[in-house]
Image (cartoon, helix red, strand yellow):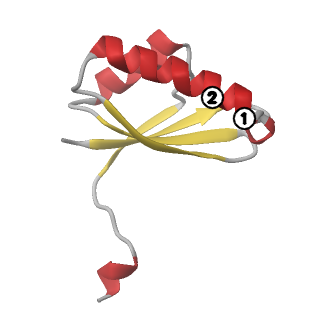
Amino acid sequence: MPQYLIEREIPGAGKLTAAELKGISQKSCSVLNEMGPQIQWVQSYVTADRIYCVYRAPNEAMVREHAQKGGFPANRVMEIGTIIDPTTAE
């Protein structure tokens, strides 16, 4: 299944409390449960003013639907073409 990198511009994201991040995560999971198993949240990275998320989904439209239903920004959605890591050098 294709994977997507989502850039969410959220001013002050790096200052969100553990409780706020938990609430955001719970909302995301609730929407995912409603949408069914075709879309999956892999993980997210929080920086100062953005959250970058990796999702598996059949298409970009489903990723954007999740964002809309959850009330999350999805400023950029990019399909991941290839994943590399240190083992790629071997």
Where residue 2 sits, quadrant-wise, is: top left
- Label at residue 75: none
Disc 1, SS: helix
Which residue corresponds to the image point at 28% horizontal and 28% vertical from the top-left? 39
Where residue 63 sits, quadrant-wise, is: top left
Q: Is residue 10 shown to the viewer in this render?
A: no
C-alpha span from label 2 to label 1 = 6 Å
Task: Give left or right: position of 54 versus 15.
Answer: left
Residue type of the residue flagged with mark 1: Ala
Residue type of the residue flagged with mark 2: Lys
Please name whichever residue, 39 or 19, is drawn nearer the observer in this view of the structure: 19
Q: Position of residue 62 (x, y in %)?
A: 30, 22
Task: Give left or right: position of 17 versus 7.
Answer: right
Q: Residues within 10 Å of mark 2 (few under 14, many from 20)?
A: few
Which residue position holds label 2? Answer: 22
Residues at discs 2 and 1 in contact (Cβ within 8 Å): yes
Q: Is residue 9 above or below residue 82?
A: above
Q: Quadrant of the N terminus?
A: top left
Task: Give left or right: position of 89 versus 72.
Answer: left
Q: Position of residue 37 (x, y in %)?
A: 23, 25
Which residue position holds label 1? Answer: 18
Tally of marks: 2
Please name whichever residue, 25 or 73, is drawn nearer the observer in this view of the structure: 25
Which residue corresponds to the image point at 63% horizontal and 22% vertical from the top-left? 23
Disc 2, SS: helix
Which residue corresponds to the image point at 33% horizontal and 11% vertical from the top-left? 34
Q: Position of residue 17 (x, y in %)?
A: 77, 33
Which residue corresponds to the image point at 55% horizontal and 27% vertical from the top-left? 25
